[in-house]
Image (tube, rainbow, N blue to C red):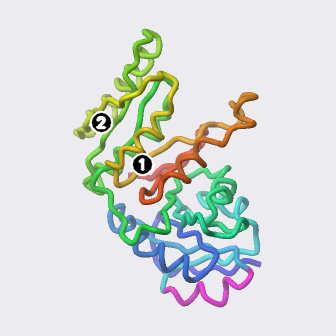
Amino acid sequence: MPTTNNKQKKDQFIAVCADSRDEAERLLPAARRMADCFHKGIIVFTCSPDGEQWVDTLGHPYAALESDWPSAIEAMPTAFNVVLAMALCDHKARRDSMANPRQLLKNFRLSKVAYLSIPATVTELRFNHVGLSLDHQRESKEKLIWASYMARFCSSQIDVYHLPYTDPDFRNRCNNNFRYLDKIFSSLSLSYEKHILESSSQLANPDSKTLALGECDMLISLVPDLRNRDLFDLFATPQPLRLLRSADHTPILFLNQRDDLYVMCD
């Protein structure tokens, strides 16, 4: 049976996902910053066999689960009212560790909440400049809502990047996404900065180019639905994994492309 403790009375929680006490302690300062901004509680999750030996010493509500990570993560919003999860990303972590980039994405593949990957090299979470990209693909409402959360609650400047489309169809679709963004932000009296990415290809991935600029403290990225993969995708490195491997100093807020993604009640 899982061991749980929930002394802090909050309606919604930010989850710290860790395989060890060291990982949890490295994530907690960032979790406290986000919890203060969003006025949420913190709950520490572990699926480690020795989790009960250390998780109750951190001073936060916790859940030490006898479960695999994907199952625990999928249950977080319904069983524990989690609206955001956090995990450490360490390129040197062992292959079966939550902190391993490939394993992290595998564990969160079915996540119904946003999840923030924090590189092991980051000692202080910053979010003065939060970046996201818009392209010709259909964007999720949740991605733009999370950008508005960062602006409203964290006083972040939102920087929106896009490719210089010359194809009329691509340009029109991208403009539609910007109109949708304008609708959401204007209703909340929020603003954003618009940036054009230099590119020789209209099929380039704007997230990779945005990340390469190194101008953002945090990147918001949409994880494509696995059901939309084609034959080429089966042999190529998944885009989210490419982002993690190149994000040495930039936390990435991932949102899975799904219709039942949970958001905060604010």
Q: Is residue 142 left or right of residue 108?
A: left
Q: Read off the residue under disc 2.
A: 185
Residue at the spot 52% in from the left edge and 63% down from the top edge: 86
Span of residues in magenta = 49-58
Q: On the image, numbered disc 1 is attached to which residue?
A: 219
| Residue 264 to residue 125: above or below | above
Q: Is residue 94 above or below residue 60?
A: above
Q: Residue at x 36, y 29 (%)?
A: 198
> Circle 2 — which element?
helix
Quadrant (top left, top right, bottom left, bottom right) of the N terminus? bottom right
Task: Tell me which label, 1 or 2, sits earlier in the chain.
Answer: 2
Residue 153 percent across, percent down from the top left: 30, 55
Question: What secondary structure is found at the residue carrying circle 1?
Answer: strand
Task: Write the residue at 39% across / 72% down.
Answer: 123
Q: Main secondary structure of the magenta part?
A: helix
Residue type of the residue flagged with mark 1? Leu
Q: CA distance from mark 1 to mark 2?
A: 18 Å
The percent position of residue 262, horizontal first and vertical second, equals 54, 49
Name the residue type under label 2. Phe
